[in-house]
Every structure is written in structure tokens, then in C-alpha cells.
Image: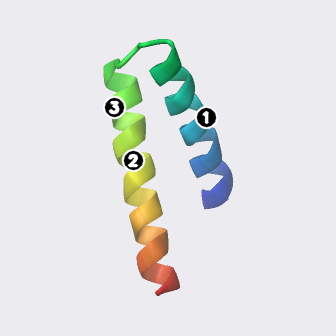
Amino acid sequence: MFAATAALGSVKIIKGIFQKQFSADTMAGLIIWMAIWLDLRIWIM
């Protein structure tokens, strides 16, 4: 579930970067994705 959400989020972020659309939605998605990634790293460790 989290992995799928993170994957979709990263694809959306990468598309936004290539399209040079650093909108609020892209930034929010990036922050949420990083938060989930860091949270997963903490849980794994």
C-alpha cells in the first residue's frame, strides 16, 4: 500500500520536474513522499 503510493507519488513528482511545473501540489507531494520514505527507513531500522 505505502510502496504503491510512494511509487505513484515519485512518478508524479518526476513528471512535474520534467514539465518544470513546481506547483504547490508537486511540492506537497514531494514532502509527503519524503516523509513516508523516512518513516519507512525508521521502521526498517
Q: Quadrant of residue 9?
A: top right
Three-letter amino acid code of the residue under disc 3: Met
- Helix, strand or loop at label 3? It is helix
Q: Earlier in the sequence, mark 2 or mark 1?
A: 1
Between the residue at mark 3 and the residue at mark 1, the CA separation in whole angstroms equals: 13 Å
Local packing at callout 3 (Cα closer than 10 Å; few below 14, some 14-19, many 20+) is some
Identify which residue, 17 or 40, lies in the foreground: 17
Residue 32, disc: 2
- What is the three-letter code of the residue carrying label 1? Val
Q: Distance between the residues labelled 2 and 3?
A: 9 Å
Residues packed near mark 2 inside 10 Å, few (<14), some (14 to 19) or many (20 plus): some
Q: What element carries label 2?
A: helix
Whether 18 is drawn above or below 5: the answer is above
Residue 35: x and y, percent? Answer: 37, 57
Disc on the earlier residue, 2 or 3: 3
The image position of residue 10, as x and y in percent, is: 55, 40
Q: Residue at x 47, y 81 (%)?
A: 43
Q: Residue 27 carries which label?
A: 3
Structural distance between the alpha carbons of marks 2 and 1: 13 Å
Task: State left or right for residue 18 relative to residue 5.
Answer: left
Closer to the eye: label 2 or 1: 1
Residue pushed farthest front?
18
Question: Is 8 rendered above or below residue 44?
Answer: above
Residue tagged 1 = 11
Disc number placed over residue 1 in the picture, else none: none
Q: Residue at x 46, y 74 (%)?
A: 41
Report the amino acid beneath label 2.
Ile
Query: Residue at coordinates 40% horizontally, 66% vertically from top-left?
Result: 38
In this rendering, would 28 be left or right of 11? left
Q: CB atoms at circles 2 and 3 under 8 Å apart? A: no
